[in-house]
Image (cartoon, rainbow, N blue to C red):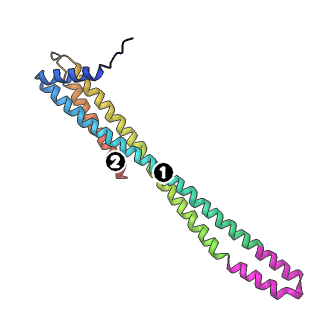
Amino acid sequence: MSVDLPTEPFDHADHAKHAAHSEDPLLIRVSATIAILAVAAATVGSFETIETANAISEKNQAVIEQNEANDNWNLYQAKSIKKNMYEIAAITNPDRKEEFDKQARRYESEQDEPSNEAKKFAKQSKKSLENSAAHETRHHHLTIAVTVLHVSIAIATISIIMPKTMRWRHAPWFASMALGAFGAIIAVAAYAR
């Protein structure tokens, strides 16, 4: 049984060596353009991934903060129920009215802290959701930008495979540079908001 070794990397190396010796200035310019566009696409793709992670992280934070708000509202309600029970007990048991009124006032005074905490955590949760939405919006813009950059790379390669004798051989290269610039503008605009 024979083992076939992959030859694709060697084929690419042969093509690159051939391109270097072809003395075609357009081929060198297009190759450099493709390299620059590829770096830009990789960079924008990394920012896209970071924005996705930040969106998820902010949403998780919003859930945690909302849980804290709920816990504090539950504590507030428990203290309110106890206060109401002591108020009812004071009315129904006049001989222990003073004792029950004291307990009712105690629970009433303890309601402020959980109420304030619940409002604080609810406000933080809302802010985290807003931050998450902003990260998601940037993610969507960056997705479009990286797609445009990848398309510009594909269009640039058309210039390489076109015969030297073709009259409009430079057109795909120019189009790829215009698309690359457009993709870069979309990426920058994602952070300009």
Labels 1 and 2: the sequence-earlier one: 1
123 in the magenta segment: no
Residue 74 in which image quadrant: bottom right
105 in the magenta segment: yes
Count of all numbered marks drawn on residues in the image: 2
Q: Amino acid at mark 2?
A: Ala
Residue sitting nearer the eye, 169 or 41:
41
| Relative to 87, residue 141 above or below | above
Residue labelled with disc 1: 133
Q: In the structure shown, which secondary structural element does the residue marked by tag 1 occupy? A: helix
Residue sitting nearer the eye, 193 or 4:
4
Spot occupied by residue 37 in the image (x, y as percentages of width and height)? 26, 36
Residue sitting nearer the eye, 19 or 69:
19
Q: In the structure shown, which secondary structural element does the residue marked by tag 2 occupy? A: helix
Residue 189: mark:
2
Q: CA distance from mark 1 to mark 2?
A: 16 Å
Residue sitting nearer the eye, 70 or 3:
3
